[in-house]
Image: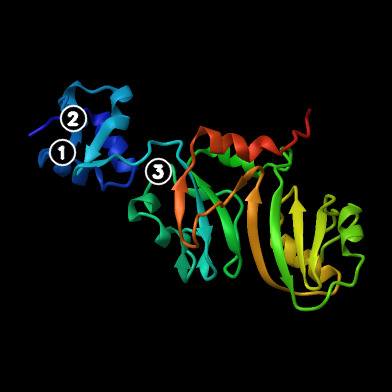
Amino acid sequence: MSAAPAALVRLLANLGYGSRRQVQMLIAQDAVTHADGTPLAALGPSDWPRLRVHGEPIDPLPGMALMLHKPAGCVCSHDDAGTLVYALLPPRFRRRRPPLSSAGRLDRDSTGLLLMTDDGALLHRIISPRRHVPRIYRVRLAQNLRGDEAEVFAAGTLLLKGETRPLRPARMQVTGAREARVTLSEGRYHQVRRMFAAVGNHVEALHRERVGGLDLGALPPGGWRLLDAQDRARIFAAATDACA
């Protein structure tokens, strides 16, 4: 039976492997080991990334970020009714502390790139309007475009129903009679849907294909992958800092 520092027990509990008591039981059963066989009692924090639980590499330590290809029908929430995006991830991820949160939600019917992280500073940097991280959406509409939408969206004067502050300028590229690609630098509630409602149209399908310089690539609907340092840099590659 291996002993382990209290800090390691706390870490594994915060990563969702169970309560502290349950983690202690895992350790007592020798289910927690180090890749090179070093006794747990001899490990320091720098050794923790090479831990294994039931022979599998430990989940990413706090500071994790991932991207998920959200399918329609899933809700970006911790506790709403219906199927949650967390159902697409390992069950432990929902129990992580700090919690894993989405950086800009997609509504139930929308699809595409969803970024999730337990890093509060990274989360704030992605969603902060001061960073101007562009978000690109592919839109299918119920009616033909009337022709002046791009000009209206780019003017920076469009006022959404129930709001008193105009939207920032947004770019729109026409890709079909009822299809367009829209680039936003802010993320208000149901913004793309409300923008088209303001010009007399209805969004039938909405897909987020890119955040900053990061896109889904070949990731299939329902799939997810962890982000590395290069991925994180790509998020901000197309952004501008309002304070610059």
Looking at marks 1 and 2 on the same chain, the residue that comes earlier in the sequence is marked by 2
Identify which amino acid the numbered label 1 is placed on. Answer: Ile
Residue on which the image places disc 2: 4
Q: Using residue 215 as the reference point, say whether residue 6 is left or right of it.
A: left
Identify which amino acid the numbered label 3 is placed on. Answer: Arg
Residue on which the image places disc 1: 27
Residue on which the image places disc 3: 97
Q: What residue sits 61% from the left and 66% below the top? A: 110
Identify which amino acid the numbered label 2 is placed on. Answer: Ala
- Residue 237 occupies quadrant: top right
- Residue 138 occupies quadrant: bottom right
Is the Cβ of the residue at disc 3 closer than 8 Å to that at disc 2?
A: no
Which residue is nearer to you in this view: 69 or 115? 69
SS category of the residue bearing label 1: helix
Which disc number belongs to residue 124? none
Count of marks, rendered view: 3
Question: 185 above or below 79?
Answer: above
Give percent across and percent down for residue 210.
64, 51
SS category of the residue bearing label 2: loop
Is the Cβ of the residue at disc 1 closer than 8 Å to that at disc 2?
A: yes
Quarter of the image with the N terminus in it: top left
